[in-house]
């Protein structure tokens, strides 16, 4: 899986083109690492999966020395202003990740401008976010976090929280590998 939203890597001539900077620069790993990715992660309620994914991605980005901006949002408004689901907080804590400070928010159209890429958990999220895309440029930013697989909704199934954590963690590792 190769991601090239704001960076086109032209390895053959050892330069990179950054749309955000608007110039060609000599390719080296440090330059590439320093280009800031802005990633939004979206699920339905923004209390179970996407806060977990936000915490995991932040944790792994930090571990890899990446200065990335990561946020999460939901397509449904039932829990706006609330903290994460306690089962997600507990699962994350079991893996030494603290997501307790998360505050649920709704996806907004301006997120298409704010973020380079928008990762969604399942096909319903994908449909809902694509329905809000204003043009092709918006739509191109929206991807399933697991590439061609979905992260199932654990809201009604306590036993799903740990497997969901593992799936998201694996997906985030692959995203980081493909971007760095
Ligand atoms: P999430 O899970 O999309 O992973 O945050 C859900 C949270 C709440 C609801 C559904 C799914 N709900 O219907 O309130």
Image (cartoon, rainbow, N blue to C red):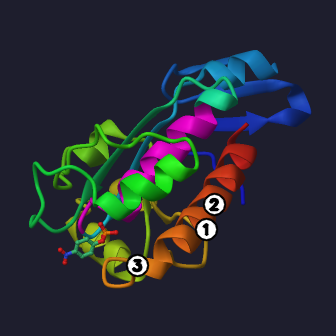
Question: Which residue position is annotated with label 3?
Answer: 158
Question: Measuring 53% from the left and 47% from the top, which residue is drawn there?
Answer: 56
Q: Secondary structure at mark 3?
A: helix
Q: Quadrant of residue 100?
A: top left
Among the two numbered marks 2 and 3 on one chain, the one whose residue lies closer to the N terminus: 3
Which mark is on residue 167? 1
User: Does residue 10 lie above or below 50 as drawn?
Assistant: above
Say whether mark 3 is within 8 Å of ligand 1: no
The furthest residue to the right: 12
- Residue at image coords 42%, 55%: 90
Front-most of residues 153 and 138 = 153
Point out the tag, 3 or 1, that comes first from the N-terminus. Answer: 3
| Callout 2: SS | helix
> Where is residue 61 drawn, in percent x and y?
60, 34
Q: Is residue 6 visible?
A: no
Q: CA distance from mark 3 to mark 1?
A: 15 Å
Q: Residue at x 39, y 78 (%)?
A: 153
Q: Cβ–Cβ below 8 Å for labels 2 and 3?
A: no
Which of pointers 3 and 1 indicates the residue nearer the eye? 3
């Amino acid at each position: 899986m190769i991601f090239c939203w704001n960076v086109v890597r032209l390895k053959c001539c050892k330069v990179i083109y950054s749309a955000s900077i608007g110039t060609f620069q000599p390719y080296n790993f440090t330059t590439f690492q320093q280009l800031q990715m802005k990633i939004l992660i979206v699920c339905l309620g923004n209390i179970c999966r996407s806060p977990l994914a936000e915490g995991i991605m932040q944790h792994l980005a930090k571990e890899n020395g990446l200065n990335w901006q990561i946020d999460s949002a939901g397509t449904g408004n039932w829990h706006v202003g609330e903290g994460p689901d306690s089962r997600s907080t507990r699962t994350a804590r079991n893996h030494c990740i603290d997501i307790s400070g998360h505050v649920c928010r709704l996806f907004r159209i301006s997120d298409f401008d704010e973020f380079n890429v928008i990762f969604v958990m399942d096909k319903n999220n994908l449909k809902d976010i694509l329905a809000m895309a204003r043009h092709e440029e918006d739509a191109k930013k929206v991807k399933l976090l697991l590439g061609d697989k979905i992260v199932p909704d654990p809201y009604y199934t306590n036993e799903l929280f740990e497997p969901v954590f593992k799936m998201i963690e694996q997906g985030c590792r692959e995203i980081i590998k493909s971007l760095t």
